Image: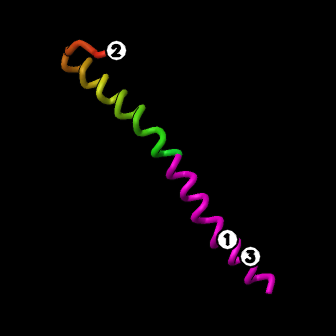
């Protein structure tokens, strides 16, 4: 019985942790794209937008 409870808790915790990590990565994407765009503009000598 105790093993079943542990398996149920683990089955709920693993997807929860994975979603938490995925959300953290996805939250960083806009800043990453903005920095990449700014770096490309600087590399090509274009005027960076504010």
**Label located before the other in sequence (3 or 2):** 3
Give x and y (percent) for residue 30.
40, 35
Which residue appears at 42% of the width and 31% of the height?
Answer: 31
Which residue appears at 35% of the width and 29% of the height?
Answer: 34
Question: In the picture shown, does residue 27 fall above or below 6?
Answer: above
27 sits to left or right of 30 = right
Give x and y (percent) for residue 38.
31, 23
Which part of the image, by quadrant, shows the N terminus? bottom right
Give the image quarter of residue 45.
Answer: top left
Disc 3 versus disc 2: nearer the observer = 2
Please tell me the numbered disc located at residue 29: none
Q: Which residues are magenta?
A: 1-23
Which residue appears at 29% of the width and 16% of the height?
Answer: 49
**Label located before the other in sequence (1 or 2):** 1
Q: Mark 1 = which residue?
A: 10
Question: In the picture shown, does residue 18 fall above or below 40?
Answer: below
31 sits to left or right of 15 = left
Packing grade of label 1 (10 A; few <14, some 14-19, many >=20) is few
Q: Secondary structure at mark 3?
A: helix
Question: In the picture shown, does residue 25 fall above or below 7?
Answer: above
Q: Mark 3 = which residue?
A: 6
Please tell me the numbered disc located at residue 50: 2
Q: Secondary structure at mark 2?
A: loop
5 sits to left or right of 14 = right
């Amino acid at each position: 019985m105790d093993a079943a409870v542990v398996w149920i808790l683990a089955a709920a915790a693993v997807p929860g942790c994975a979603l938490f990590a995925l959300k953290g990565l996805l939250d960083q994407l806009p800043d990453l794209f903005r920095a990449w765009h700014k770096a490309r503009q600087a590399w090509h000598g274009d005027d960076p937008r504010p």
